[in-house]
Amino acid sequence: MNSETNSKAPWKDCSPGVRLLRPEEVFERTGLSRSQVYAMIADGAFPPFLKLSTRAAALPETWLECFIESRAQAILKDPA
């Protein structure tokens, strides 16, 4: 893994896998609000949703797992 990519967007190094999560499930699993998630996506700090059709979007589960793992690793390295 490229450490620069890993620190900025760790999900870019992850395969999308097969399971897709709809936005409501992402909000529930992360505990983040809709507005927080979309603000973080705009900042490049959260994996983007894939547009499946004009009215449907989903996030690959593996991307969310990579994001969560990177956040946990950052805390373990610097528990400030």
Image (spheres, helix red, strand yellow):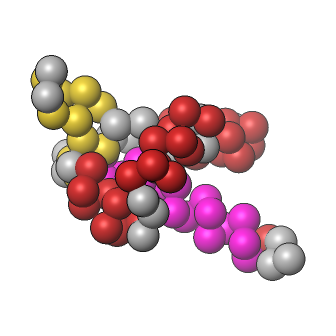
Main SS category, magenta section: helix
Instruction: Indicate yes or no whether the magenta region holds residue 68.
Output: yes
On the rendered structure, is 49 left or right of 8?
left
Tell me which corner region of the image, top left, top right, bottom left or bottom right, holds residue 24. bottom left
Tell me which corner region of the image, top left, top right, bottom left or bottom right, holds residue 27. bottom left
Q: Quadrant of the N terminus?
A: top right
Magenta span: 60-76
The answer to whether residue 37 is above or below residue 65 is: above
On the rendered structure, is 14 left or right of 54?
right
Q: Nearer the viewer, residue 31 or 7?
A: 31
Instruction: Indicate yes or no whether the magenta region holds residue 66.
Output: yes
Residue at the outermost front position: 35
**Residue 19 rendering spot, x and y as whole percentages:** 20, 51
The answer to whether residue 41 is above or below residue 67 is: above
**Residue 47 rendering spot, x and y as whole percentages:** 47, 42
On the rendered structure, is 32 left or right of 5?
left
On the rendered structure, is 30 left or right of 79?
left
Residue at horizontal 75 percent and vertical 37 percent from the top = 4
Residue at horizontal 30 percent and vertical 45 percent from the top = 60
**Residue 10 rendering spot, x and y as whole percentages:** 58, 45
Residue at horizontal 42 percent and vertical 59 percent from the top = 33
**How many callouts does the rendering have?**
0
Does the rendering let one see residue 57?
Answer: yes
Does the rendering let one see residue 9?
Answer: no
**Residue 80 rendering spot, x and y as whole percentages:** 85, 77
Residue at horizontal 14 percent and vertical 28 percent from the top = 55
